[in-house]
Amino acid sequence: MKLLEAQAKEILCGFGIPVPENAGMVSRPGDIPRVLKKAGAGPWVLKAQVLTGGRGKAGGIRVVRASSQMKKNLLEMLGMTLVTAQTGPEGVPVRQVLLEKPMEPARELYFSVALDRRLGCALLIASSEGGVEIETLARNSPEKILKMEIGPSGALEDNQARELLFRLGLYDSDQKKSRERAQFFKNCVRAFFALDASLLEINPLALTAKGGLVCLDAKVTVDDNALFRHPELARYEKAACLSPAEKEAKAAGISYIPLSGDIGCMVNGAGLAMATMDLLKQHGGDPANFLDVGGGANVEQVTRAFKIILSDKNVKAVFVNIFGGIMRCDVIAEGVVSAAKVVKLSVPLVVRLEGNRKEEGAAILSKSGLDITSVGDLSLAAARAVELSRNHGRTP
């Protein structure tokens, strides 16, 4: 689960991590009078709450100095489509805007803790140069990026904290300041582990004129599989920026991630789903989604999965790839037939069944009377799906 900046900052405050003062969030025009009353005189920073980087360059962060201009700017930002280098040309809608007190940092730094699966541990990443150009810095001057493994204790050790201060140029002869800065980083690492996070990023991390560290922007991603341990995050989960299709999938217990291609995929098992997408790409196709119905899907779930896939208007063909281990191929076949009738399928459908009761499943498909292309070989099935997606809608 990815948290919006305002949500991440609210949580980090609970771990003793300083953040700028804010006047609240605007989600609809009716919120504006209340928030402006609390805000009082400017200046204020208006920050679009979207799950993408590069907001500033795209007009998603504005400094408004005159109170008279606040309402106008808020109304302009609410509902706007923010197009950044990360979103692609389609952009993302702005549904919430945070009002925050501006800060003029003496220095901007970069700090993050991320789960490194290759190393099998949490990795602290930091740089004495932060801000919007951090990606360019990492690409052109990788030697300026500090990396530090966090051990099994799940804590930043004292010696690591001291090294971090020295290498970031934050060690101060004033021992109180150095201790406070070291504690800031320790709190960040503690928050990462306490939240079961896979990413905690602060960029920019501000060094104030008084020598303190303040989190100016934050990204936090929490492992979905650990959410049962965090009932306190439920309210953020409900407010997550999910599309209608993603919300439907979550309600149905289906793992679904929209992509930019035109071949809808329904697969059981994450590994098989990844292999299926790789095969489609190998044959020159482009998957429209990652969708895993899991090992125990029933007819109703399969039908809902079809509706989710077809809610994407870019889909020109659907590829169902099922390996029947725990899952039975005949159940999937019944679901496919039922769904095709319910949703009035208007795009080509390729089905590949293998494993438990595949013969029964194949019989159900062949007797359905529906235009379903059944292919036993996985690679050939993927190639056929790509071919049909290319030809769909063309005049013979």
Image: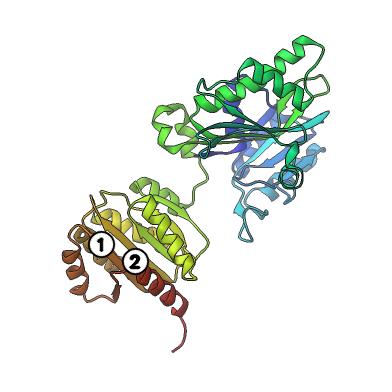
Asked which quadrant contains residue 330, the reply is bottom left
- Between discs 1 and 2, the one toward the N terminus: 1
**Residue drawn at (62%, 51%), measured in percent from left and top?**
79
Q: Front-most of 15 and 130?
A: 130
Do residues under tags 1 and 2 come within 8 Å of each other at their CB atoms? yes
Q: Is residue 101 left or right of residue 332?
A: right
On screen, 52 above or below 88?
Answer: above
Q: Is residue 14 above or below residue 352?
A: above
- The reply to whether residue 338 is visible in this rendering is yes
Q: Quadrant of residue 371?
A: bottom left
Q: Which mark is residue 378?
A: 2
Q: How is the image coloured?
A: rainbow
Q: Position of residue 379 (x, y in %)?
A: 37, 68
Label 2, secondary structure: give it: helix
- Residue placed farthest to the bottom in the image? 396
Residue found at x 44% / y 66%: 280
Quickly name the residue at label 1.
Answer: 354
Horizontal relation, residue 215 to residue 90: left or right:
right
**Split into 4 quadrants, where in the image is the C terminus?**
bottom left
| Residue 181 drawn at (x, y percent) | 71, 19
**Three-letter amino acid code at the position of disc 2:** Leu
Dot 1, crowdedness within 10 Å: few (<14), some or many (≥20)? many
